[in-house]
Amino acid sequence: MKVEASNQLLVLALTLCGVNSIGTTEPDGTLDPAIPPSFLAPDGEITDPTILNPAPEFPAPLDGTPNISIVAQSKLNDFLLLEQYAAASYCDYNNNYPQGGRRLACDNDVCPDLDPLDQITEYEFVHPPGFLGWSSTGYIATDNSNHLTILAFRGSHDVGDFIRDAQLVMTSTGLCPVVCLAHSGFWNTWKLSSNDIINALLPVVRQNPQNRLMITGHSLGGALATLAATVLRGPPYNLELDLYTFGSPRVGNYFLARHISRQGMGNNYRVSHIHDPVPGLPLKGLPPFGYFHVWPQWYITSGNNVSVTVNDIDEYNWNEEAMATTDVEPPAGYDTDVTTALDIPNVAAHLWYFRQVSGCTLTTPPTAPATFRRRQRIRRQ
């Protein structure tokens, strides 16, 4: 508990000192063009990701030991792509034009693999802060190259966001029959913006039935993405979608984590990075009302500023009965907490997911005219 508490204090201290980005961006992770994303067939049609990435053949034991497997290159490509969509939400340029109709663009080599794609924003949002300063920022975009519709949430971008990340108070959500409690800051932030986001998203989903819906986010954005995905998978929307989060904090209690993990209607991909302290926040409590993570988890074992290969990511898939015991979330695996005095958590690890995830500073239109496209208005007529 003392180690976990020090993690929390380290995040707040470094943030208060202004540590919010790391300049190094090389070597970076790149997509392998010879291997398409796992949700596409060779002819470009969407395939069932549950078939391409089946669940482990044998269930995890009940002693808190996970099934551990190495990801395929196609799944690594998925992570590289969706991380860049999450990273693009940090660019003010990509979220400050509500009517959309612009190509996503980044600086500082944050999302280079998005540039050649046939992608465009459909809706961009910066919701004004509400009670206690809660707000959400991001965009909805379509990617015709990969047949995707993306809802992306920006992560922690200022000191206030990080402080709210660390709050411990939970609130009822009504998301499941039992007591599904969520972090009050995350839940209230989502609720303040949910009507606008859902009203903008549903027409895009209807107009693009060939696309698979992806919801993504990093840090605080991962928490908001998790709650948004849970709501949209349930009634009355019943949308099938995949959830990709990077460096997400814990979102709620065990009952909520279990509900999200077994909800169906798509797949959950919670990616964490060694030495990243944010997945250890808020501090884990005893079941059933303490904070717990959604499972399964994909755990990046390589350090900062290095390319990630398939040998650097382990999948941890847990048996949900084991999750309800006091022995769950072992430090070296499921929860990515520090394990020894040598494993020092650092904010740099939180900011490095395949590349510099929060490094975009773009606020004005890029100079290249090819980055603009008004196809959206034509398509909606």
Image: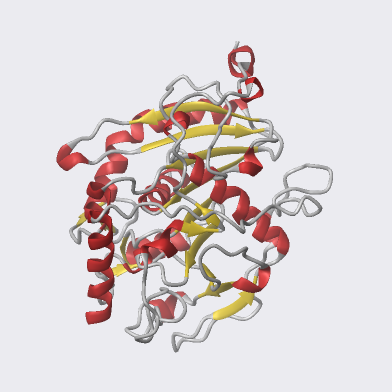
Residue 351, image x and y in percent?
Answer: 43, 57
Q: How many marks?
A: 0
Name the residue at the front extreme: 23
Drawn side of residue 220 relative to residue 282, left or right: right
Quadrant of the rendered image containing residue 165: bottom left
Quadrant of the rendered image containing residue 291: bottom left
**Colour logic:** secondary structure
Name the residue at the right extreme: 43
Q: Quadrant of the C terminus?
A: top right
Q: Quadrant of the N terminus?
A: bottom left
Name the residue at the bottom extreme: 63
Residue 296, image x and y in percent?
Answer: 51, 68
Residue 372, image x and y in percent?
Answer: 60, 21
Query: Above or below — where is 260 with respect to 381?
Result: below
Query: Above or below — where is 14 with respect to 2?
Result: above
| Between 323 and 34, the one nearer to me in the picture | 34
Residue visible at 58% across and 73% down in the picture: 314
Residue 112, image x and y in percent?
Answer: 62, 42
Quadrant of the rendered image containing residue 370: top right
Residue visible at 63% across and 24% down in the picture: 368
Residue visible at 35% across and 36% down in the picture: 194
Query: Above or below — where is 96 with respect to 233?
Result: above
| Between 108 and 75, the one nearer to me in the picture | 108
Q: Is residue 241 visible?
A: no
Query: Above or below — where is 97 with respect to 248?
Result: above
Q: Is residue 124 visible?
A: yes
